Image (cartoon, rainbow, N blue to C red):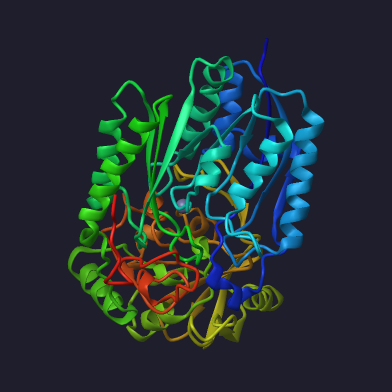
């Protein structure tokens, strides 16, 4: 008999500090896909659902597509929005009954007004609906702040191992491919969640301490009873009692082994914590260094504006790094991109070939910098639509809304302006607007780490610029009003007792 799987989800990385910037995240902010729309959006893409759909085909399962809601990281989700999405998802699962399994696309760091743990709440609701015999599986983002409640209600949680998240497809696939053994009872997963009181800055898994932790997890996974060992970096830009690093280990029926394995990894993370402490440069110093590297070794030197990463809940219209770039007077540089729908619209009204005066960016709050008064030449206008080519989201269609490529008058700097919030993942947005990044000395963009999947191979060097902002590497600057205890590196008293 083919397994029947209900598939859906609510995916959001909630930056609770962004409430002051945007207010709560409302229902209208979500992109909601229903039924076949989920297939149209995701099939053939390197995403969780892309992997889950192929996994269902591989095991010959019948998939009932319900509701999938996602939006850019932003402030706490309103209760009204969550209730509406949750009720719709539960309704879809109820209509799909009888089923063998529920497959969920979740993030792991969702926060709702009055609910610290979106995923735990949702999984509890689904468990109450489907009962204990139906298996629930979920691939998760390694930036999830994982809770006991999630582990109690989700049979198998598989976090991505890589940052950039280039293994989303594989983790989705794996979650579905485990279902026949879960449903038959051959695999009886027990999961231990080990909290480590640490706030990690963006930590690439390509090298360094985060890679070493992954390698330890993979070594421990060689034990025949260990099903999965995942190092969740956690999401430091949210203030809940569960915020922090978690090591999550699932074994086949052996609770003590799960706990012991998780603690082994957790101790390693804690003992190596100083290696995770970021060495950051101000925008001025980062740009100066980038200009020097480009002069010596050629471009493109990629500068990432890490503190204003929409992919972590920042507005995407910050001006600290762009201002530093303009003040350095580079010969040939491009900034891609600044979120400013007003300036994009003004450029489209003026048309290609026009010269206009704009106040660019800095329109959300003072933290991310003041607007820049610029005279710009409108070089290119586009619809902002393209498909990602990076291994993380490859094949996924997206839109940054109406875009403009603006040449700053009296300057070697060009700026891309978009109308939707997003970090920059790969070179496609530059190509769309007529820019071959290989011909530039400096390429600046807003992202903390995901861009590496699209730029590491072509950049002469990558230089990180940090500044005040909602996604700064300096996690210690945020107030922790809800923390359950001291957290490294903010509190010198933080201690891991495991
Ligand atoms: Zn992530």
Label tally: 0
Q: Residue at x 61, y 20 (%)?
A: 57
| Up/down of 46 relative to 457, above or below | above
In which quarter of the view is residue 421 placed?
A: bottom right
Q: Residue at x 71, y 76 (%)?
A: 349
Image spot of residue 289 (x, y percent): 23, 74
Image spot of residue 137 (x, y percent): 57, 33
Q: Residue at x 28, y 54 (%)?
A: 497
| Up/down of 427 relative to 447, above or below | above
Along the line of sight, the residue nearer the viewer: 147 or 64: 147
Seen in the image, is 128 located left or right of residue 288? right
**Image quadrant containing the N terminus:** top right
In which quarter of the view is residue 252 placed?
A: top left
Seen in the image, is 34 located left or right of residue 175? right
In which quarter of the view is residue 226 placed?
A: top left
Along the line of sight, the residue nearer the viewer: 345 or 466: 466
Q: Residue at the top extreme?
A: 1
On the question of residue 469 being in view, the answer is yes
On the question of residue 28 being in view, the answer is no
Seen in the image, is 35 located left or right of residue 156? right
Image spot of residue 362 (x, y percent): 54, 82
Q: Residue at x 59, y 48 (%)?
A: 119
Image spot of residue 72 (x, y percent): 59, 59
Along the line of sight, the residue nearer the viewer: 398 or 258: 258
């Amino acid at each position: 008999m083919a397994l029947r799987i209900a598939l859906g989800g609510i995916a959001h990385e909630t930056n609770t500090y962004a409430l002051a910037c945007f207010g709560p995240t409302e229902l209208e902010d979500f992109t909601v896909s229903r039924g076949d729309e989920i297939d149209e959006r995701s099939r053939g893409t390197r995403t969780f659902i892309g992997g889950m759909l192929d996994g269902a085909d591989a095991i010959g399962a019948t998939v009932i597509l319900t509701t999938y809601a996602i939006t850019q990281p932003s402030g706490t989700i309103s209760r009204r929005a969550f209730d509406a999405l949750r009720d719709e998802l539960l309704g879809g699962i109820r209509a799909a009954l009888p089923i063998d399994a529920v497959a969920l696309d979740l993030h792991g760091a969702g926060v709702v007004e009055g609910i610290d743990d979106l995923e735990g709440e949702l999984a509890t609701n689904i468990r109450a609906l489907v009962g204990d015999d139906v298996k629930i599986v979920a691939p998760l983002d390694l930036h999830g702040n994982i809770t006991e409640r999630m582990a109690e209600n989700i049979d198998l949680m598989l976090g991505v191992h890589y940052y950039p998240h280039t293994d989303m497809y594989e983790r989705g696939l794996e979650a579905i491919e485990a279902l026949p053994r879960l449903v038959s009872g051959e695999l009886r997963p027990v999961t231990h969640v080990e909290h480590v009181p640490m706030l990690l800055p963006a930590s690439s898994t390509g090298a360094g301490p985060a890679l070493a932790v992954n390698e330890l997890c993979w070594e421990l996974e060689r034990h025949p009873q260990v099903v999965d060992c995942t190092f969740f970096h956690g999401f430091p830009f949210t203030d809940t009692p569960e915020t922090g690093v978690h090591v999550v280990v699932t074994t086949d029926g052996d609770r003590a082994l799960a706990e012991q394995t998780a603690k082994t990894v957790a101790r390693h993370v804690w003992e190596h914590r100083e290696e995770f402490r970021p060495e950051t440069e101000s925008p001025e110093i980062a740009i100066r260094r980038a200009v020097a590297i480009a002069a010596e070794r050629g471009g493109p030197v990629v500068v990432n504006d890490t503190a204003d990463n929409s992919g972590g809940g920042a507005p995407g219209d910050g001006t600290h790094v762009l201002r530093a770039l303009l003040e350095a007077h580079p010969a040939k540089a491009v900034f891609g991109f600044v979120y400013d729908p007003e300036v994009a619209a003004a450029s489209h009204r003026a048309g290609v070939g026009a010269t206009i005066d704009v106040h660019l960016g800095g329109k959300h709050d003072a933290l991310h910098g003041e607007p820049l008064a610029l005279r710009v030449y409108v070089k290119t206008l586009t619809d902002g639509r393209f498909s990602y080519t990076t291994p993380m989201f490859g094949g996924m269609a997206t839109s940054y809304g109406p875009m403009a490529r603006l040449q700053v008058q009296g300057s070697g700097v060009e700026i891309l302006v978009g109308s939707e919030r997003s970090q920059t993942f790969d070179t496609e947005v530059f190509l769309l607007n007529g820019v071959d990044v290989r011909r530039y000395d400096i390429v600046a963009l807003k992202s903390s780490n995901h861009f590496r999947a699209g730029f590491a191979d072509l950049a002469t060097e990558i230089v990180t610029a940090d500044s005040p902002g909602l996604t700064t590497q300096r996690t210690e600057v945020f107030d922790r009003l809800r923390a359950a205890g001291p957290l490294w590196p903010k509190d010198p008293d933080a201690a891991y007792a495991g």
